[in-house]
């Protein structure tokens, strides 16, 4: 799978586990994709919200994670509206 994104592009990755991860692209090689601040959508009574992909990961560690390419089924640039929601979830700032 060839992955051609620019550093800090917000991308969506569909995993073989059916999870859809939204994250900032860092880099990719033949074996892995490295992303920053990975989040997944979760349904709540108030609608959908972003939650951390690795809920149990230590908050003191870097938010960059490595995902093995064999578990990625598809990738895409994330929809602009969801990018705004993603930035709000990861920074606490609301984009106008």
Image (tube, grey):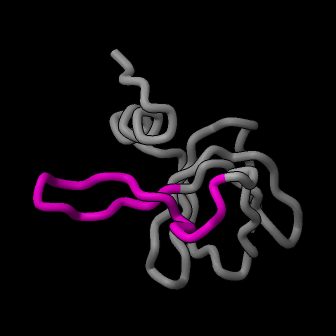
Give residue 41's quadrant in the image.
Answer: bottom left
Horizontal side of residue 33 vs 46, given as left or right: right
Magenta segment boundaries in residue numbering: 39-59
Q: Residue furthest left?
A: 45
Residue drawn at the location 49% of the way across and 56% of the way down:
39
Give residue 92's quadrant in the image.
Answer: top left
Query: Is the C terminus in the top left, top right, bottom left or bottom right quadrant?
Result: top left
> From what the image shows, is residue 61 above or below residue 55?
above
Query: Is the N terminus in the top left, top right, bottom left or bottom right quadrant?
Result: bottom right
Residue 43 position in % (x across, y down): 23, 64
Task: Please say whether residue 45 is one of the residues in the magenta stretch.
Answer: yes
Residue drawn at the location 76% of the way across and 65% of the way down:
66
Task: Please say whether residue 43 is one of the residues in the magenta stretch.
Answer: yes
Residue drawn at the location 42% of the way across and 41% of the way down:
89
Horizontal side of residue 86 vs 7, given as left or right: left
Residue 65 position in % (x across, y down): 72, 61
Q: Residue furthest top?
A: 96
Residue 86 or 60: which is nearer the viewer? 60
Residue 50 position in % (x across, y down): 38, 53
Tag count in the figure? 0
Residue 54 or 30: which is nearer the viewer? 54
> From what the image shows, is residue 66 above or below residue 48?
below
Residue 20 position in % (x across, y down): 46, 66
Residue drawn at the location 74% of the way across and 48% of the way down:
4
């Amino acid at each position: 799978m060839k992955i051609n994104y620019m550093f800090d592009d917000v991308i969506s990755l569909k995993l073989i586990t059916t999870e859809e991860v939204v994250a900032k692209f860092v880099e990719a090689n033949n074996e892995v994709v490295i992303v920053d601040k990975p989040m997944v959508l979760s349904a709540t009574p108030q609608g959908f919200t972003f939650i951390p992909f690795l809920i149990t990961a230590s908050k003191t560690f870097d938010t960059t994670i490595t995902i093995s390419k064999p578990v990625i089924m598809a990738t895409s640039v994330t929809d602009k509206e969801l990018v705004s929601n993603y930035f709000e979830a990861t920074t606490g700032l609301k984009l106008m």
